[in-house]
Image: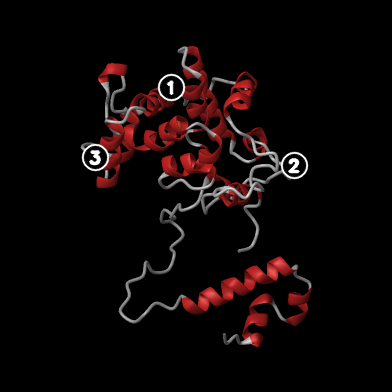
């Protein structure tokens, strides 16, 4: 690989400035430099053009990483062997945690079983990592540690929220009319996911997440995590090595939440 060392060092402010940087910061800078070299579009390719500073920025990553406009939240260090509770307390934003607690509380007050309450408590947690297709990301994040029914409920709530079910009093939310517009038709993969879930034996598990979801946006309601700690202990298989360090297929996802500022 050809790297013009002088040009690279110049982007860092010279040799002296480069020496004062940490190895991680240098690795990051080198990565940006190499990608910038690759970024020249092929001839004829259409680009989005230069930023005007006023357009809506693309939101590919989760709330923990900032929205591209405001400074990301400052993060406290995590314990060596982090538990799910540590992630609730130290690695999610206040708004998401309040929403999750309110929806789990709604399920608890309605007399739901523990799987349903846990699904509500975790249904949007993946938004800390990634917002696009958040049902799938949130489900995958916890898949090795919870009952299959819980994962199913979390995964399919994303698609089901666009489809009413009068049998449980779930109407198409007014909020979605405002967000997605009148007459919005979800994408084919969302419709396919809905149809699959609709005839699945765990359909109601996912459906009830959408029901409790609607009652979980109250700015004046405080719900504590304490009433759910025992439910988590009974239904979430906490790995002894800590989430992120158990070599599971999703360990890297938890690590990304622990160290969102790590280089590549
Ligand atoms: Fe959701
Ligand atoms: Fe939600």
What kind of element bears circle 3?
Answer: loop
Query: Which residue sits at x=60%, y=33%?
Result: 237
What kind of element bears circle 2?
Answer: loop
The quadrant where ligand 1 appears is: top left
On residue 184, the disc is 3
Quarter assignment of residue 243: top right
Q: Note whether residue 218 is visible.
A: no
Which quadrant of the figure contains the C terminus?
A: bottom right
- Please report contact status of discs 2 and 1: CB closer than 8 Å, yes or no: no
Q: Is residue 256 above or below residue 177?
A: below
Q: Mark 2 points at which residue?
A: 79
Q: In this view, does 114 lie above or below 252?
A: above
Q: Mark 1 points at which residue?
A: 215
Viewer-proximal residue, 51 or 234? Answer: 234
Cα distance in 3D space between marks 3 and 1: 22 Å
Cα distance in 3D space between marks 2 and 1: 33 Å
- What count of labels does the image hold? 3
């Amino acid at each position: 690989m050809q790297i013009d060392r002088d040009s690279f060092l110049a982007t860092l402010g010279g040799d002296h400035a480069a020496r004062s940087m940490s190895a991680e910061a240098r690795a990051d800078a080198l990565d940006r430099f190499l990608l910038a070299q690759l970024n020249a579009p092929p001839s004829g390719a259409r680009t989005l053009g230069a930023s005007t500073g006023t357009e809506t920025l693309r939101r590919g990553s989760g709330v923990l990483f900032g929205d591209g406009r405001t400074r990301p939240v400052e993060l406290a260090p995590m314990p060596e062997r982090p538990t799910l509770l540590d992630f609730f307390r130290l690695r999610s934003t206040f708004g998401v945690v309040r929403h999750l607690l309110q929806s789990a509380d709604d399920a608890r007050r309605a007399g739901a079983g523990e799987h349903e309450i846990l699904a509500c408590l975790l249904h949007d947690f993946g938004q800390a990592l990634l917002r696009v297709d958040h049902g799938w990301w949130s489900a995958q994040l916890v898949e090795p540690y919870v009952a299959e029914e819980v994962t199913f409920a979390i995964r399919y709530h994303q698609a089901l929220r666009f489809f009413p079910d009068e049998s449980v009093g779930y109407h198409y939310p007014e909020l979605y009319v405002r967000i997605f517009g009148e007459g919005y038709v979800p994408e084919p993969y969302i419709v396919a996911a809905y149809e699959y879930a609709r005839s699945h034996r765990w359909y109601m598990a996912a459906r009830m997440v959408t029901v409790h979801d609607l009652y979980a946006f109250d700015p004046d309601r405080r719900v504590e995590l304490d009433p759910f700690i025992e439910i988590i202990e009974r239904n979430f298989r906490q790995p002894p090595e800590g989430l992120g360090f158990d070599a599971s297929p999703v360990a890297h996802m938890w690590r990304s939440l622990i160290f969102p500022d790590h280089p590549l």
